[in-house]
Image (tube, helix red, strand yellow):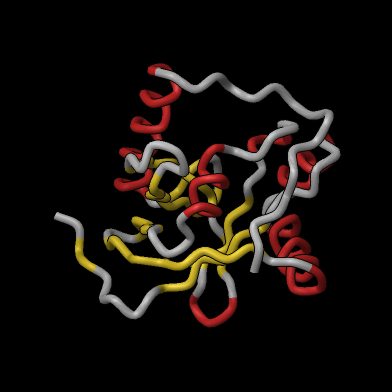
Amino acid sequence: MAFDTPAGTKGARQPKAGLMMRWVNNTAAGRIRRRGRMMGFNALILTTTGARTGAERVNPVGWFPGPDGSWLIVASAAGAPRNPAWYHNIAAHPDEVKIEVQGRTIPVTAEQLHGAERDQAWQQIIAAAPRFGQYQGKTDRELPVIRLVQRSEPATPDS
């Protein structure tokens, strides 16, 4: 399905990219590798290929169980008017995404949910983590819900 969520015109302030944000992401990724959780819910480490640079990018992201063992993530950017950079990366390279979860690195394919399928997943997400409903209330863009489905390549244990 298409990655087609445009930026909004209002929303929460989005943190600036740069060295400080990379440090925060790396620190969070270390905690996720040790504990598997972040801010009270399950978390994974999302690895994407930069849309413009082609460089590997790593972001900690909360996840929710999807159908058939998939993972659901939300491109919330805490309710900012623009989608997070990782959204644009997976839109450009949906078949070049990996996740680290429960000590394994898993190759996945990313797909954005739309319509009734998105609505059902959204209800599940806000029931489990009401803060996402608050994020939606801050912005006029519809927060994208992304399903990550394991590719046929085998998962690898992390060393």
The residue positioned farthest toward the left in the image shown: 159
Task: State whether residue 46 is above or below residue 10.
Answer: below
Of residue 55 and residue 74, the one placed in the foreground of this image is 55
> Residue 79: x and y, percent?
73, 35
Position of residue 57 in the picture relative to residue 40 (left or right) = left
Name which quarter of the figure residue 123 lies in. Answer: bottom right
In which quadrant will I find the C terminus? bottom left
Number of numbered markers = 0
Closer-to-camera residue (5/22): 5
Q: Does 154 sit left or right of 53 as displayed? A: left
Point 79% across, 40% down: residue: 134
Which residue lies at the image location 40% right of the left edge and 49% below the top edge?
48
Which percent across, then down, holds residue 118?
A: 74, 66
* Relative height, residue 108 to residue 90 (above, below): below
Image side of residue 134 versus residue 72, left or right: right
- Asked whether, in this view, residue 145 is left or right of residue 65, the answer is right
Q: Position of residue 150 (x, y in %)?
A: 41, 73
* Residue drawn at x 54%, y 40% as measured from the top left: 39
- Residue closest to the far front: 52
Q: Residue at x 26, y 76 (%)?
A: 154
- Above or below residue 71? Residue 33 is above
In the rendered image, the quadrant that contains the N terminus is bottom right
Q: Pick the residue in front: 111 or 100.
A: 111
